[in-house]
Image: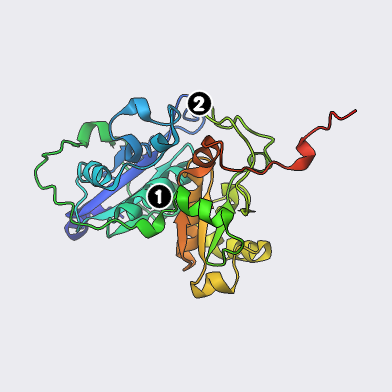
Amino acid sequence: MDWRARPELVEKLVVLEAHFSSVDHPPDPERPVFRHLPGAIQIHPSYLEAGLNRAKYYPFYEHPTEANVLPVAELTNVLEGLGIAADSRVVVYGSDPDGVMAAARLVWGLMYAGVPCVRLLDGGIEAWVGQGGETDFEIKSVWDVADTSDNAVGRTASWLARPEYLATGAELRRLVSEDQSADRRLVDVRTEGEWSGAMIKKYPFFSRGGHIPKAIHQGDWNNLMDGRSRSLSPHLEVVARRWRELGIIDEGVENGSTTLIFYCGTGWRSSIAFLVAHLLGFRAKNFEDGFYGWSFHPENEVIVEQDLLLSLDV
């Protein structure tokens, strides 16, 4: 299978390879990335946060807003700079390390921006090869192809953003302060140590640990996918059963009157949970400020598990 042999598919197709690496998250030398989908553009998820300004890429955040996707007009500009138009078909897949997380971040950002046709290649490059797909050894980089100038030819901003996919800090503060919030449910997708407050320094820019009040802990993002294939679709019903057991899914979620709001550290892992909920047919939002954005403001309460606090009373 090689879509270059299908001109009707290639004409409006944009393929993005989500490749996440950083100074604290280097590529795994045991798992080199040497196969790519034909015609793909390799892109770091932080491109949606800072365009071509690599100095602002993860983990070089100095403020929570730097970990957020760009304002809609700027986000549209950097996406159009990749050749994405209103009638494009955009396919995203991940490459190691943590390709699923990187791909999900891009997919959520594209959906939030309002790009009409976005698809996740579930299972990434391995699924493609398993179906007989052709691969290339060479790949274009976003640094080679992106044009983010304000006056680029053909910029129309002809899609509409989808703000219903984004939860804001003000929305979460209302949720936390209300006695009842049946129309929204907050879900934490971080590790046990992050949730409890035992692990503060998972990120170098955090100063507090714990979790947001009223959140339900669903566990780390790895339990959102099939462990062998790293695919979402084979694991959807497993996740749905666990979410029902945890009280994340109830009648309100199933009938659409309750929206699930997911958060993690900075909105990347929670993008996976958003996609899972979306695929299950539920209303969902990503709180991309994450615990970073919430805990950054000292007036926002955080919950730390009490057994972590040693009594010094005499």
Near-viewer residue (157 or 281): 157
Colour scheme used in the picture?
Answer: rainbow
Position of residue 314 relative to residue 16, above or below, is above
The three-letter amino acid code for the residue at tag 1 is: Val
Q: Earlier in the sequence, mark 1 or mark 2?
A: 2
Left or right position of 308 against 95: right
Q: What element carries label 1?
A: helix
Position of residue 60 relative to residue 127, above or below, is above
Q: How packed is label 1: few (under 14 Cα within 10 Å), some, or many (20 or more)? A: some
In this view, which residue lies farthest toward the left? 153
Near-viewer residue (14 or 134): 14
Q: Position of residue 217 (x, y in %)?
A: 64, 52
Q: How packed is label 2: few (under 14 Cα within 10 Å), some, or many (20 or more)? A: few
Q: What element carries label 2?
A: loop
What distance separates the C-alpha of mark 1 from that of mark 2? 30 Å
- The circle on residue 77 is none
Position of residue 1 relative to residue 50, above or below, is below
Tag 2 residue: 24
Q: In which quarter of the image is the N terminus?
A: bottom left
Tag 1 residue: 129
Picture quarter containing residue 164?
A: bottom left
Q: Position of residue 222 (x, y in %)?
A: 58, 48
The three-letter amino acid code for the residue at tag 2 is: Asp
Q: Which residue is drawn at 76% across and 41% down?
A: 306
Near-viewer residue (226 or 115): 115
Near-viewer residue (163 or 7): 163
Left or right position of 269 against 106: right
